[in-house]
Image: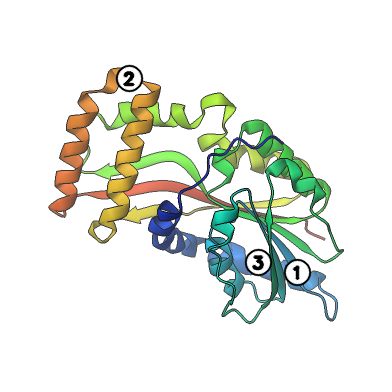
């Protein structure tokens, strides 16, 4: 699986983290079921092996580890060593008994050594920036190995801005097309993964985990809308200069406390039932 994902900026990962954590609260029942599933597989003295793809600065580790009520050893995989270096060396979660960091591309995933312990493959805000082929290959790999799965915060392509503006639909269409450029899965990522995992006999649960952003998320909204416009215009240059006026209006609404944004995401949990 050749990795084409662009490197994530550390400041962007930091900026989105509170919104991600709030959104993932909706997936608590699925995480609880996953925790029970792992516990049922553990023998005395065993720990679940959690492999985190595109681990970045460790946000998925920080969120998920305390919510998995089993001993855990984590392997953090990211091709950006600088991001992995920002993962705290000392963790406050008692369930985590070890963390290792591996600078690898996804095409090296098959070389990650296994140890026979129950394994969970997880990622957050990664699945949708893989190609469709990568998503299908990843889902096939984990299903054939019998691993449990938690793919979190994959975009759905649905964005609601309140109040609505006439240009919203054109920007959404161009942005989503940009997300699918060069064969990227984009908003289809969860659907693709769910289909492959289900076809291999895994039980799949999909939970809506949208960002719900208001005046308290001003910095994130500004960054998100600015980047959204840039991507839309990159796909469809004819949108400029209308998008300049659109963005100015949206940022004015934001400063006045009159803008809310809902960004669709989904979490996918899968496991092989007895």
- How far apart are the two marked residues, 1 and 2, measured between alpha carbons? 49 Å
Q: How far is mark 1 from mark 3, CA to CA?
A: 15 Å
Question: Which residue carries the number 1 mark?
Answer: 48
Along the polypeptide, which appears first: circle 1 or circle 2?
1
Residue 198 appears in view? no
The disc, 3 or 2, on the residue closer to the chain's N-terminal end is 3
Q: Is residue 204 left or right of residue 273?
A: left
Q: Quadrant of the C terminus?
A: bottom right
Residue 188, how many percent across, how many down?
55, 35
Is there any visible trace of residue 75 in the rendered image? yes
Label 3 vs label 2, nearer the camera = 2
The disc at residue 33 is 3
**Residue at horizontal 63 percent and vertical 32 percent from the top:** 132
Q: Dot 1: what SS?
A: strand
Give the answer, above or below, for where 258 lies relative to 39.
above
The residue tagged with tag 3: helix, strand or loop? helix
Relative side of 121 to 18, left or right: right
Give the quadrant of the N terminus: top right
| Nearest to the observer: residue 182 or residue 69 | 182
Residue at 70% across, 76% down: 70
Q: How many marks?
A: 3
The chosen color scheme is rainbow
Crowding around mark 2 (Cα neighbors within 10 Å: few <14, some 14 to 19, many 20+) is few
Locate residue 109 relative to residue 168 in the image: left or right.
right
- The image position of residue 57, as x and y in percent, is 53, 60
Q: Residues within 10 Å of mark 1 (few under 14, many from 20)?
A: many
Disc ID at residue 190:
none
Q: Which mark is residue 237?
A: 2
Marks 1 and 2: which is nearer the front?
2
């Amino acid at each position: 699986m050749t990795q084409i994902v662009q490197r994530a900026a550390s400041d962007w990962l930091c900026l989105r983290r509170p919104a991600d954590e709030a959104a993932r609260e909706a997936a608590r029942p699925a995480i609880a079921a996953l925790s029970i599933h792992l516990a049922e597989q553990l023998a005395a003295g065993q720990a679940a092996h959690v492999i985190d793809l595109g681990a970045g600065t460790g946000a998925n580790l920080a969120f998920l580890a305390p919510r998995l009520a089993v001993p855990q050893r984590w392997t953090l995989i990211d091709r950006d060593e600088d991001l992995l270096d920002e993962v705290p060396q000392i963790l406050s979660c008692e369930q985590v008994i070890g963390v290792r960091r591996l600078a690898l591309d996804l095409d090296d995933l098959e070389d990650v050594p296994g140890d026979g312990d129950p394994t969970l493959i997880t990622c957050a805000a990664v699945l949708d920036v893989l190609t469709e082929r990568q998503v299908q290959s990843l889902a096939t790999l984990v299903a054939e190995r019998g691993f449990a799965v938690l793919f979190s915060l994959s975009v759905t392509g649905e964005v609601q801005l309140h109040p609505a503006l006439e240009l919203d639909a054109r920007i959404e269409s161009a942005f989503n097309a940009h997300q699918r450029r060069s064969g990227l899965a984009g908003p289809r990522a969860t659907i693709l993964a769910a289909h492959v995992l289900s076809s291999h006999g895994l039980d799949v649960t999909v939970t809506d985990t949208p960002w719900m952003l208001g005046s308290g998320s001003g910095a994130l909204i500004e960054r998100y809308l600015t980047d959204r416009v840039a991507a839309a215009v990159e796909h469809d240059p004819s949108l400029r200069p209308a998008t300049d006026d659109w963005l100015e209006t949206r940022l004015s609404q934001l400063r006045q406390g009159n803008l809310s944004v809902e960004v669709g995401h989904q979490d996918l949990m899968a496991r092989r039932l007895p």
